[in-house]
Image: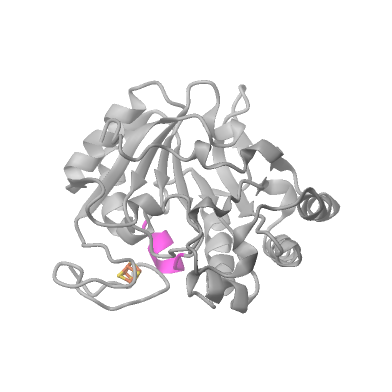
């Protein structure tokens, strides 16, 4: 493998013999592959979204609800042809789309697998990521991904540094978002309201950080035409996954007042999209990663 610069960490390591920030080898590891019903309505629909959860993450937020699949021992190893075959099997299960979750650290190989089967899938391909990506890596996906589903998590460098050790998060995520929109353009829905093409931006409101959330929305609105994208405002933050030594603000849930403030800001900016109820803030919605599903 070439020295890895797949994500903005740009570690420059040979992952066949060493590890960078993400801690993952160059061989792909899939933690779980299965229909998933917990995404936004235009992604999950009635039949579910065909999720492929890749093990590992190059962002590594301290409160991550999927931290159980961060290591290299929590899934099955895949070659490019085997991954392409998994994509076909999942698409054939009747799901509405193929949903590739946190694959940034494997972008080159995932792109190679998609290139083998893209014209046989029959469903849109969704790239579901933390938003911390390089424009160069996203370029590998141009023409292979139909729907981008990125997070835009933080605006303030201090918050991004505290939560993910990535003070450049907003700068990188902003450039990535612009590239995603350049590739796929405005949202297009089918007759059943399922997203066929476009960008759906997720933002998780964090406890005590509603001011940063509003700043995130302002940044997104400055980068993209809000009428052409969709926004998913998530209030599912739960402190269950925050380590004991995490900053104090991460040890509670988001209040109704905080969430409402961010929702009002989104409406004022003209965003259309999806909100979550209070009962979403529970660990019960995290997939069971001890079950690898079809992987
Ligand atoms: S994908 Fe991993 S090794 Fe490569 S640059 Fe990112 S964190 Fe470093």
Q: Is residue 231 above or below residue 93?
A: below
Looking at the image, the residue that sits furthest to the left is: 17
Left or right position of 122 against 270: left
Left or right relative to 107: residue 73: left
Q: Across the whole image, how many numbered discs are drawn on residues?
A: 0
Answer yes or no: is residue 276 visible: no
User: Residue 160, percent across and down?
Assistant: 56, 72
Query: x, y percentage for residue 249?
Result: 65, 65
Task: Give the image location of residue 32, x and y in percent.
Answer: 32, 39
User: For the stretch drawn in magenta, what is the main secondary structure?
Assistant: helix
Compared to residue 86, the image places residue 148 above or below, namely: below
* Residue at x 39% of width, y 64% of height: 58
Closer to us: 71 or 29: 71
Camera-side residue of 40 and 223: 40
Residue furthest front in the image: 244
Q: As displayed, is residue 256 above or below residue 216?
A: above
Q: Quadrant of ligand 1?
A: bottom left
Figure colour scheme: one colour
Res. 89 in view? yes
Q: Quick check: is 295 in the magenta stretch?
A: no
Residue plotted at (42% across, 48% down) = 143
Estimate the x, y position of residue 263 in percent, counting from the top left.
Answer: 78, 50
- Bounds of the magenta span? 133-140
* Quarter of the picture holding the N terminus: bottom left
Left-right relation of 90 to 214: left
């Amino acid at each position: 493998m070439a020295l890895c610069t797949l994500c903005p960490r740009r570690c420059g390591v040979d992952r066949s013999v060493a590890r960078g920030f993400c801690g993952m080898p160059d061989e792909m590891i899939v933690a779980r592959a299965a229909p998933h019903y917990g995404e936004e309505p235009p992604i999950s629909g009635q039949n579910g979204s065909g999720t492929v959860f890749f093990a590992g993450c190059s962002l590594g937020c301290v409160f991550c609800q999927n931290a159980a699949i961060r290591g290299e021992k929590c899934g099955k190893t895949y070659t490019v042809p085997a991954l392409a075959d998994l994509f076909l099997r999942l698409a054939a299960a009747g799901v509405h789309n193929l949903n590739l979750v946190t694959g940034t650290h494997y972008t080159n190989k995932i792109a190679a697998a998609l290139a083998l089967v893209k014209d046989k899938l029959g469903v849109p391909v969704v790239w579901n990521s933390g938003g911390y990506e390089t424009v160069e890596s996203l370029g590998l996906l141009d023409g292979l991904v139909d729907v981008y589903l990125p997070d835009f998590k933080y605006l303030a460098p201090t918050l991004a540094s505290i939560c993910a050790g990535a003070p450049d998060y907003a700068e990188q995520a902003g450039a990535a978002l612009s590239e995603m929109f350049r590739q796929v353009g405005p949202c297009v829905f089918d007759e059943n309201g399922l997203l066929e093409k476009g960008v759906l931006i997720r933002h998780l409101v964090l406890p005590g950080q509603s001011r940063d959330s509003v700043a995130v929305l302002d940044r997104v609105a400055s980068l993209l035409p809000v009428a052409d994208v969709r926004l998913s405002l998530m209030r599912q933050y739960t402190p269950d996954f925050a380590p004991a030594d995490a900053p104090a603000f991460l040890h509670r849930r988001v209040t109704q007042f905080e969430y409402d403030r961010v929702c009002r800001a989104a409406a004022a900016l003209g965003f259309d999209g999806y909100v979550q109820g209070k009962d979403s803030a529970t660990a019960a919605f995290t997939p069971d990663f001890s079950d690898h599903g079809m992987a």
